[in-house]
Image (tube, rainbow, N blue to C red):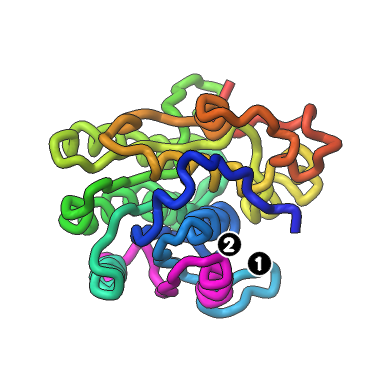
């Protein structure tokens, strides 16, 4: 309810029959991207850890699989820990075998802890680096052979444009390092893969997005009033996946800016609370 995407009709059907591998797709932005692509007829690989219901966080790989099928896509739910090479490799192989190949990998799984160096325990530091930046390396390393066979391969990572201002580094350098690491790897991959036809880009929201990260890691559920719904990131991701010939490869994209370029003018419907659409909070790492 209240999460219907704003369809950009010129691309409708562009992902039909394509296979999209999404990490962390059991809830939040990953789920929204899965449903958006499913509505276009895509095959969705729901690669996430959540196989059992969580008392505070709704959604599992199986519940999203049901939603994907209902939306018009084909679903493959796979329990995957993006830190584990064998699990990622097996999931990619299973997906390619099931659907005949892989056309896009979306690095959405993430870990967040907004603490400075002194306050960040080593275990939490290692968790953020492994789930954020290392997972971009690992999924790309393992997925590239499949993506090279696609006629329009994509690697999309949900990470911010590089912004090394001290105000972003001082309060949360460990997290910033993990997210900027995702972007640096993506920029390097874009150059590395330029002649292969695989497009590599990053995507970040202009405003806060109403997800569990906002509720439990960044602030509180009250911050949803200053946030947009995950569907805005899904619409932007869809536009990226529909773009061919490497046009967006190497770019650090912002959801609102990309959608404006693609003709969206009404952003009120994206707001979690439309009455607060003019009082949204700008996301981390953006000025």
Q: In this view of the protein, can residue 175 be seen by the observer?
A: no
Q: Are marks 1 and 2 in contact (CB under 8 Å)?
A: yes
Residue in view at x 41 percent, y 29 percent: 252
Q: Magenta segment, which residues?
A: 61-87
Residue in view at x 44 percent, y 74 percent: 77
Distance of label 1 from label 2 (alpha carbons): 8 Å
Number of residues whose C-alpha sits closer than 10 Å to that of mark 1, classed few (under 14), some (14–19) or many (20 or more):
few
Number of residues whose C-alpha sits closer than 10 Å to that of mark 2, classed few (under 14), some (14–19) or many (20 or more):
many
Q: Position of residue 125 (x, y in %)?
A: 44, 50
- Asked if the stretch drawn in magenta spans residue 119, the answer is no
Q: Quadrant of residue 168?
A: top right
- Classify 188 as above or below 215: above
Residue under label 1:
57
Residue in view at x 51 percent, y 25 percent: 261
Q: In this view of the protein, can residue 195 be seen by the observer?
A: yes
Q: Is residue 182 left or right of residue 287?
A: left
Q: Which mark is residue 27?
A: 2
């Amino acid at each position: 309810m209240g999460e219907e995407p704003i369809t950009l009709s010129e691309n409708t059907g562009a992902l039909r029959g394509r296979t999209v591998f999404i990490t962390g797709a059991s809830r939040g932005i990953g789920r929204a991207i899965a449903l958006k692509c499913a509505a276009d007829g895509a095959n969705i690989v729901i690669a996430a850890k959540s196989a059992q219901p969580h008392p505070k966080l709704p959604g599992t790989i199986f519940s999203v699989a049901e939603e994907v099928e209902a939306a018009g896509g084909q679903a493959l739910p796979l329990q995957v820990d993006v830190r584990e090479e064998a699990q990622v490799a097996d999931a990619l192989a299973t997906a390619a075998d099931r659907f005949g190949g892989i056309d896009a990998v979306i690095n959405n799984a993430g870990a967040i802890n907004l603490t400075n160096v002194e306050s960040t325990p080593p275990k939490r530091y290692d968790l953020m680096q492994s789930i954020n930046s290392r997972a971009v390396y690992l999924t790309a390393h393992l997925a590239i052979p499949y993506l090279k066979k696609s006629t329009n391969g994509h690697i999309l990572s949900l990470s911010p444009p590089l912004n090394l201002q001290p105000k972003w580094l001082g309060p949360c350098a460990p997290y910033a390092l993990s997210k900027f690491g995702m972007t640096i790897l993506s920029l390097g991959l874009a150059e590395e893969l330029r002649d292969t036809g695989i497009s590599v880009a990053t995507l970040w929201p202009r405003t806060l997005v109403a997800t569990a990260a906002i509720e439990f890691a960044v602030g509180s559920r009250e911050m949803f009033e200053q946030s947009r719904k995950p569907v805005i990131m899904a619409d932007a991701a869809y536009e990226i996946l529909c773009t061919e010939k490497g046009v967006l490869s190497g770019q650090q994209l912002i959801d609102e800016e990309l959608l404006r370029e693609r003709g969206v003018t009404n952003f009120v419907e994206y707001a979690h609370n439309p009455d607060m659409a003019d009082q949204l909070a700008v996301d981390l790492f953006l000025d």
